[in-house]
Image (cartoon, rainbow, N blue to C red):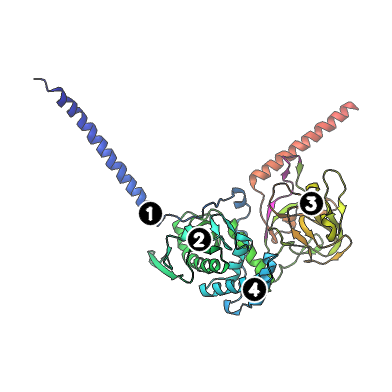
Amino acid sequence: MPRPARFVVAHAIAPATRRVAALVVLVFAVSMLAQRAQGDAEPWRARRRPGARASERAAVLVDIAEWPAEPPSPAADSIDVARFASALRELCGSMPRDRPQRYAEWIVGAAREASIDAFLLAGLVFRMSRCDPDADELGGLGLTLLPREMYAAELRHGVYRYRVRDAGGAWSMREKRLDRFPFAGPRLIRAEENLYFAAHLLAAWSEQHAAIDDAFAQAPHRHFISHWVWGDRVQSARAEDRVLTDRRRMLRYYGALSDSAPIERLGVTMSAPLDGTPRVVSSFLGSDREEGARAHRGIDVEAAAGEPVRAIADGRVSFAGCDLPGTQAAVDLPPNRIDEIARAELGPGGHFVCIAHRSREAPLVSCYMHLEETFVATGDIVTRGQKLGTVGRTGMRISSPHLHLELRTGPGIRDASEVMSGILLGHEPPDERRARERTRRRRAHDAWLAQRGASNVE
């Protein structure tokens, strides 16, 4: 007897339903295993600073193994607050008269209480906000661009709870009582409160960072300060390089760090053109400019606006003034007249200074371009390390402030990144090196064609 149609349909559906159910269970089991595996690798959802993005190009300029060990800081209890305030004024530049002293007291006090390096905290203040208490960017507020949302879940009711790994490898919870001020967004604009929280949160990062570096995928880096910028997953070491450079500058201005040791190159005794060595070269000799229309005649050294630019060696100022566009002659101007030419009318070099050095080898001239201010005039005798001006971006179109440095010798332009290796760090990215070589070959071929054409005409 034939079965009812509904039974036949039900009988046919049942195996399919069982297969789907089995598949769902399998997928769920795999998902749970994946989540467990992910949980083993990353013990919590990674904290991150909103808006922070890594530059792939910047990340390959310097291998972290090239950096020397960072110099030590004076013991916290021995810091002279007045000297610290003077150093902070030099680091930050123009500030209201009483601000350096107040900031120095708060930075040193917060650093002592949290047992962290006051010079590191000062470097962070400069790098993140340029010492501006009203700064508001990269998802953060105030002097250190403190990203409140990154810590809000763990810092509640005046207690910061954070996890560290014990000797057995297990995560355990620690607490810091941070109840002197409310951890509220608008209040973080206040300098004292911002520095108080930043110091203690940095101290927590210093305890956590080794274990966090193992638990979360990281770009190679040297210091826990990277986590202030990125959160649990560090995406690039370049941010920490800059903060640590500013820390070294602060140490120098305080008097706890000597100038970099001079080097003997090209027949002269040289030292760094910028403070806080070593410094990073961000663009190299021969790199394409204006879409390959011309080649870079020097190197660019990464710097912040307003930094002092120093003579690399003793000599005489052979030029101080302004570059003009095209084939126009540069205009010699003393410091008090440097702004007579409108910035929109400047050539690519902007305000610049050149020094002729007495070399035991070929004649040598060093040039410093894109300056904001100049402090010397043509004919002045200068000594190694003397201030020539400040970092700016005169003559530039789109670049951020930096120092353009040229070394001109009898045979032509020398590569300052090679001549001053050790004082300057950095390597041209491989893709840019290949592009530069292609441009060089094209120019050589164009020149050969032009010469051949001229010969045929003759």
Q: CA distance from mark 4 to mark 1?
A: 47 Å
Q: Earlier in the sequence, mark 3 or mark 1?
A: 1
Above/below status of 453 relative to 286: above
Q: Nearer the viewer, mark 4 or mark 1?
A: 4
* Image side of residue 283 versus residue 144, left or right: right
Identify the amino acid type marked 4. Gln
Identify the amino acid type marked 2. Gly
Residue at 75%, 67% in the rendered image: 262
* Between 342 and 40, the one nearer to me in the picture: 342
Tell me the magenta residue range: 279-293
Above/below status of 73 relative to 311: below
Q: Is residue 332 magenta?
A: no
Q: Give the residue number, with chain letter if any, for mark 1.
A: 39
Q: Is residue 284 magenta?
A: yes
Residue 4: horizontal and vertical position, in percent?
13, 23
- The quarter of the rendered structure image containing the C terminus is top right
CB within 8 Å, label 4 to label 2? no
Q: Nearer the viewer, mark 4 or mark 3?
A: 4
Q: Nearer the viewer, mark 3 or mark 2?
A: 2
Q: Give the residue number, with chain letter if any, for mark 2.
A: 185
Q: Give the residue number, with chain letter if any, for mark 3.
A: 350
For residue 365, say whether it is visible: no
Q: Earlier in the sequence, mark 2 or mark 1?
A: 1
Binning the other alpha carbons within 10 Å of mark 2 as few (below 14), some (14 to 19) or many (20 upward) gives some
Identify the amino acid type marked 1. Gly
